[in-house]
């Protein structure tokens, strides 16, 4: 413990040097993630730190996050375990120190195992396991602290069923090399039917390649009903997002919440005298809150019987999916209403200020409009010549050069059906080929990559020498144009795309807005009504 005491002391000094009472909880969240949990990254990447160190760090961070003013007792309204969950799962995304230590050591062990030809891996092999593999390596008689840490990461790897040698199956054994398809007989023999359905959605590479280890990706639930996935990405100040998250997590000091923690206060609402002041009551059901909601521009009337804030927030998000701009305004104003209703309640309890619903409405609407105005970029356009304007047209607004072609692609993906659409145009804008293709894949990102691969194969067969590929999926374009390794689900497809590019003299990839990509989108959707790959006549009216 003494060896790593300096890190603890440095973390403590950084936290104590901050004016805690001047930081909102969103500010504290940023400081914990960017400062406190980052100071020990180097040490935890190489050594297994003592449990006492992790416990002390966890206590310091909890105290810093929940303490309001120096010298006063504080309440931890939400457990540290809940705070360490990702925002998609309803937490704040803090890192549990002990699990972070294990994860970083596991990453170090993974690097040693997956790249045994590197200099440092060969050195460690000669030193600690010269006659065996890394998975069978032992501690030895005189291990260093670094080797002890690597073996802790070794435990992380070997504890997962997918990395146990006795259960390993080579991918090459599951593939019919002649047809480049999955061997369904072997899949059904070795795997559960649900796993078989997932495996056959993995696209196979067009080119043979050696087996290699890949890092197992986490399985995320399909439907996340937590607040983080519903409101976490809204365009709101962090302090308001934080309040709404705490309100949905029973993490604010309503009188019912205080009494549940054995604090001797009355449970009645200080405004209307309702016997139980819950979060849902003070923000939605109190007569004061109902008057504010109904009198606002929203004209909203909370449900008459036991309204729940989480359900109301879900209705705002559902509306924003139907009418995006209007829905964002509704959700934003509603969030400011909740913020100012909470502030009005605290002004009554602590300062005796009665306030009125009209004040809450006026302040909320003004604050929301000010925030919207602050987000808008100033509209200024310097005078340009006609030539300059033509040169600055987006790429998708310019025709390809003489004898050049454009390939537009899109993918449609749902639980029950998935399909591709791709269209090739010449330098005059005329359609040369338009294809709809039903195809199984596991995600929209995978579908977009597959559509590009299939479109390239079609372009090569048409003898295209100059090609510009356009997609409305920015992520797949960025991955293709980047040298960094893509996610596992599309790694083989991206590799195929880069190899197919070499068959075309000039080939580039660019992102375009979805409204410009309407023909490829229509082709992908039309594939739902066809039995197999369909090449549409260029005289088709909707093309």
Image (cartoon, rainbow, N blue to C red):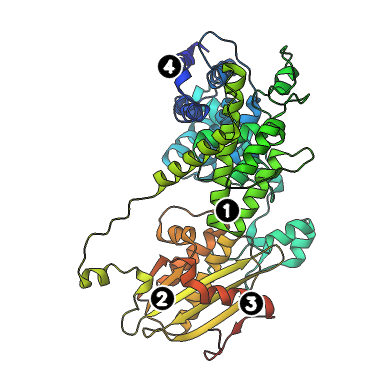
Task: Work out whether residue 291 or residue 224 is closer to the camera in this orientation and state it.
Answer: 291
Between the C-alphas of marks 2 and 4, the distance is 57 Å
First in residue order: circle 3 vs circle 2: 2
Res. 139 in view = no
Residue at 43% x, 18% y is 19
Q: Earlier in the sequence, mark 2 or mark 4?
A: 4
Residue that label 1 marks: 327
> Viewer-nearest of labels 3 and 2?
3
Q: Position of residue 148 (x, y in %)?
A: 55, 25
Q: Contact (CB < 8 A) between labels 1 and 2?
A: no
| Residue beneath disc 3 | 527
Circle on res. 10: 4
Q: Residue at x 47, y 53 (%)?
A: 485
Number of residues whose C-alpha sits closer than 10 Å to that of mark 1, classed few (under 14), some (14–19) or many (20 or more): some
- Spatial distance from mark 1 to mark 2, Cα to Cα? 47 Å
Image coordinates for residue 428, horizontal then vertical, percent = 37, 86
| Residue 83 in the image, given as x and y percentages of width and height | 61, 30
Query: Which one is earlier in the sequence, the residue at label 4 or at label 3?
Result: 4
**Residues at badges 4 and 1 in contact (C-beta under 8 Å)?**
no
Q: Is residue 196 above or below residue 45?
A: below
Q: CA distance from mark 4 to mark 3?
A: 60 Å
Q: Secondary structure at mark 3?
A: helix
Q: Residue at x 57, y 49 (%)?
A: 330
The residue that disc 2 covers is 503
Tell us which disc is closer to us: 2 or 4: 4
Res 336 quadrant in image: top right
As rendered, which of 207 and 304 lies closer to the eye?
304
How much space separates mark 3 and mark 1, taking CA atoms? 31 Å
Nearest to viewer (mark 3 / mark 1): 1
Q: Secondary structure at mark 2?
A: loop
Mark pair 3, 2: CA separation:
28 Å
Q: Nearer the viewer, mark 4 or mark 3?
A: 3
């Amino acid at each position: 413990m003494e060896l790593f005491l300096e890190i603890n002391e440095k973390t403590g000094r950084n936290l104590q040097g901050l004016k805690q009472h001047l930081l909102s909880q969103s500010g504290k969240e940023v400081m914990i993630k960017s400062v406190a949990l980052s100071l020990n990254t180097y040490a935890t990447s190489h050594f297994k730190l003592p449990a006492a160190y992790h416990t002390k760090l966890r206590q310091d961070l909890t105290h810093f996050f929940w303490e309001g003013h120096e010298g006063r007792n504080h309440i931890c309204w939400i457990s540290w375990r809940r705070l360490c969950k990702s925002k998609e799962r309803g937490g704040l995304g803090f890192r549990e120190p002990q699990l972070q230590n294990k994860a970083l050591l596991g990453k170090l062990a993974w690097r040693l195992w997956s790249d045994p030809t590197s200099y440092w891996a060969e050195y460690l092999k000669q030193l600690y396991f010269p006659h065996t593999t890394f998975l069978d390596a032992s501690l030895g008689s005189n291990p260093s602290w670094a080797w002890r840490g690597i073996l802790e990461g070794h435990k992380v790897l070997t504890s997962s069923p997918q990395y146990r040698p006795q259960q390993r199956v080579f991918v090459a054994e599951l593939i019919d090399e002649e047809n480049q398809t999955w061997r369904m007989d072997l899949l059904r023999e070795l795997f559960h039917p649900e796993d078989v359905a997932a495996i056959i959605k993995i696209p196979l590479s067009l080119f043979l390649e050696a087996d290699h280890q890949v890092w197992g990706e986490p399985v995320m639930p399909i439907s996340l009903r937590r607040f983080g996935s519903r409101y976490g990405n809204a365009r709101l100040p962090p302090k308001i997002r934080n309040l709404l998250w705490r309100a949905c997590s029973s993490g604010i000091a309503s009188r019912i919440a205080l009494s549940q923690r054995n604090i001797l206060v009355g449970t009645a609402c200080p405004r209307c005298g309702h016997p139980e002041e819950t979060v849902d009551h003070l923000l939605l059901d109190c007569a004061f809150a109902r008057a504010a909601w109904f009198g606002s521009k929203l004209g909203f009337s909370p449900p008459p019987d036991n309204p729940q804030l989480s359900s109301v927030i879900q209705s705002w998000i559902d509306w924003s999916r139907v009418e995006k701009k209007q829905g964002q305004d509704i959700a934003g104003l509603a969030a400011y209403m909740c913020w100012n209703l909470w502030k009005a309640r605290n002004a009554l309890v602590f300062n005796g200020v009665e306030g009125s619903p009209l004040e809450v409405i006026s302040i909320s609407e003004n604050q929301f409009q000010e925030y919207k105005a602050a987000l808008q970029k100033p509209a200024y356009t310097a005078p340009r010549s006609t030539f300059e304007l033509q040169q600055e047209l987006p790429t998708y607004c310019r025709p390809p050069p003489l004898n050049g072609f454009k390939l537009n692609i899109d993918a449609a993906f749902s639980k029950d059906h998935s399909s591709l659409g791709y269209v090739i145009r010449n330098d005059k804008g005329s359609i040369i080929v338009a294809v709809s293709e039903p195809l199984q894949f596991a995600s929209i990102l995978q579908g977009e990559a597959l559509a590009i691969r299939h479109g390239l194969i079609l372009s090569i067969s048409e003898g295209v020498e100059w090609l510009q590929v356009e997609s409305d999926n920015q992520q797949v374009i960025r991955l293709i144009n980047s040298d960094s390794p893509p996610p596992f689900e599309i790694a083989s497809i991206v590799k195929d795309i880069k190899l197919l590019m070499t068959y075309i003299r000039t080939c580039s990839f660019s992102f375009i807005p979805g409204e410009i990509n309407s023909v490829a989108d229509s082709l992908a959707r039309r594939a739902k009504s066809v039995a197999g790959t369909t090449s549409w006549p260029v005289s088709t009216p909707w093309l």
